[in-house]
Image (tube, rainbow, N blue to C red):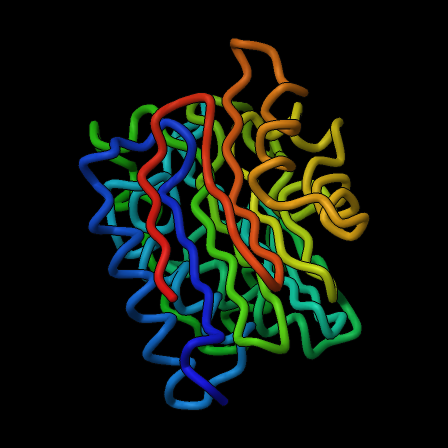
Amino acid sequence: MAETYFKVLAHGGAGSDNAFKDGPETACLKILNQLKQGKSVLDSACLGVVSLEDDGRFNAGVGSRTRANGAVQMDASCMDSAGGFGAVAAMEGFKNPVLAARLLVERNEKLLAGSGAEDFAREQGLEVFPGSVSAGGADNAGTDTVGCVVFDGKTFASALSTGGTGGSPAGRVGDVPLIGCGLYAGPYGAVAATGKGEAIALNMTAFRAYQMMEEGMGPQFVLEEVLDWFEEDEDIGLLLVNRKSYAAGSNRSMAWAVME
């Protein structure tokens, strides 16, 4: 497959410091490397998110914020335009929840939560990471969900991960594991959202954004339209890619990168 078809975008979340752009850049480089080795678009997108989960400056994986009870509970999801989808919610104790979401793509069960997600991750041998260690630092204080979108000239994919809203009740779940809310991928493109989870979910943001691209609207136009759906006090950011172009933006700062 021709290298020039590759389009890869990654972000560190709405509210992430633009100075941390090297994090998404590293994720993009890792995704491109996977694609050049012949890895699937979905696997490549998930490994890009792993890179962001392993970067403590962002609110995912090792940098996840703590809940009101001091626990660290994480959500993650992934989807491709071939119909694959997997997600976990309110998951504790594992370093890379997006890898559990990826494994669920191959299962009948598509979304596992809480102890069920943890038991599954343990059975699959995923790396354990104590919540007491991943308490999140000052760098990620204002950041939201991290994500990637990928196109290899044939297939689209999107992947997300988050530590959730800091100080929120244990068990609170936002948009990330809900198909069509935080992410969507289909034959016309891929979308990854970040921001206030409840508002993103209530707007069915990712699917509606995808529908606009399906109707022929360009990613930049869709981005500008979607940002207008949200109130000033509601964080929102998007990555979008279709066969011809891409767009990324937020109503907050947002560290992001693109590589082709």
For the point 70% across and 36% down, the residue is 205
Seen at 59% across and 65% down, the residue is 157
Image quarter of the C terminus = bottom left
Q: Percent from the top left, x then y, of residue 55?
A: 25, 51
Q: Residue drawn at (50%, 22%), measured in percent from left and top? A: 235
Nearer to us in this view, 237 or 167: 237
Which one is nearer the viewer's eye here, 114 or 28? 28
Q: Nearer the viewer, residue 39 or 68?
A: 39
Decide if residue 67 is on the left or right side of residue 181: left
* Percent x, y of residue 46: 47, 66
Would you say 148 lies left or right of 107 here?
left
Above or below residue 183? Residue 117 is: below
Residue 254: x and y in percent read 36, 33
Instruction: Place residue 175 in its image quadrant.
Output: top right
Left or right: residue 174 versus residue 23 is right
Residue 109, located in which quarter of the rendered image?
Answer: bottom right
